[in-house]
């Protein structure tokens, strides 16, 4: 590993430690404004996540398989601090009318956004999320082969974790799921034919 890379990782770790210290200090003090508290929490966790992502990028060329050396284990460097990245809803927003997103099994809505820049695609995706929730369907994000790379700006795993259920699928996950369903129905048909 180059000296500059080691130095960069060391600096990132120091930044991460400083952010975690700020988080723990603020958490212990009396926060008078809950919105201010949530904003600080969000900013700190975004910085910590970014920091971990940078460390991972720097470490990837040097990793050997699935083996992670203890001093480079990104989870161990948090010193046991666990943080929930799912932001709570502001009290003023919670008074608005809402709908529950409870997709029925086997029901999907494929997001199709065909024109414009990335910002237009994200607006289109936001509308698809609303209609998927309204129609009780899971949302399927378009494949990066035919559309933008949504995985760069949309964290599917985080959305599903924060909502507590599988509501968003990548196109690849959806495709594999449909192939498995087709294989199962094919085998069921073949068994019935034999009877």
Image: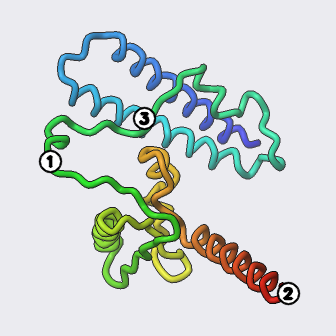
Judged from the image, the secondary structure of the residue bearing numbered disc 1 is loop
The mark nearer the N terminus, 3 or 2, is 3
Q: Position of residue 23 (x, y in %)?
A: 40, 21
Furthest residue in direction top, as rendered: 29
Gap between marks 3 and 1 measured at Cα? 27 Å
**Which residue is at a point 27% across and 33% down the rendered structure image?**
39
**Which residue is at a point 65% across and 40% down the rendered structure image?**
4
Residue that numbered label 1 is attached to: 96
Q: Nearer the viewer, residue 140 or 15?
A: 140
**Which residue is at a point 66% across and 74% down the rendered structure image?**
181
Judged from the image, the secondary structure of the residue bearing numbered disc 2 is helix
Q: How many marks?
A: 3
Indicate the quadrant where residue 186 lies.
Answer: bottom right
Residue that numbered label 2 is attached to: 194
Side of 71 where 130 appears, left or right? left
The local crowd at label 3, few if under 14, some if 14 to 19, many if 20 or more residues have their Cα within 10 Å, is some
Q: Is residue 84 visible?
A: yes
Indicate the quadrant where residue 79 lies.
Answer: top right
């Amino acid at each position: 590993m180059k000296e500059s890379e080691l130095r960069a990782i060391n600096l990132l770790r120091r930044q991460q430690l400083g952010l975690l210290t700020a988080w723990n200090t603020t958490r212990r003090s009396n926060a008078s404004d809950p919105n201010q508290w949530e904003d600080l929490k969000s900013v700190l966790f975004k910085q910590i996540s970014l920091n971990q992502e940078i460390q991972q990028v720097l470490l990837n060329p040097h990793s050997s398989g699935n083996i992670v050396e203890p001093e480079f284990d990104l989870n161990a460097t948090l010193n046991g601090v666990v943080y929930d990245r799912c932001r709570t809803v502001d009290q003023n927003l919670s008074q608005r009318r809402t709908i529950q997103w409870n997709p029925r099994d086997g029901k999907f809505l494929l997001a199709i956004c065909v024109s414009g820049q990335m910002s237009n695609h994200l607006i289109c995706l936001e509308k698809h999320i609303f209609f998927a929730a309204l129609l009780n369907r899971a949302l399927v994000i378009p494949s990066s082969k035919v559309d933008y790379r949504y995985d760069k700006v949309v964290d599917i795993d985080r959305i599903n974790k924060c909502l507590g259920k599988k509501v968003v699928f990548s196109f690849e996950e959806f495709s594999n799921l449909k192939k498995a369903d087709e294989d199962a129905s094919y085998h069921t048909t073949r068994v019935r034919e034999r009877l």
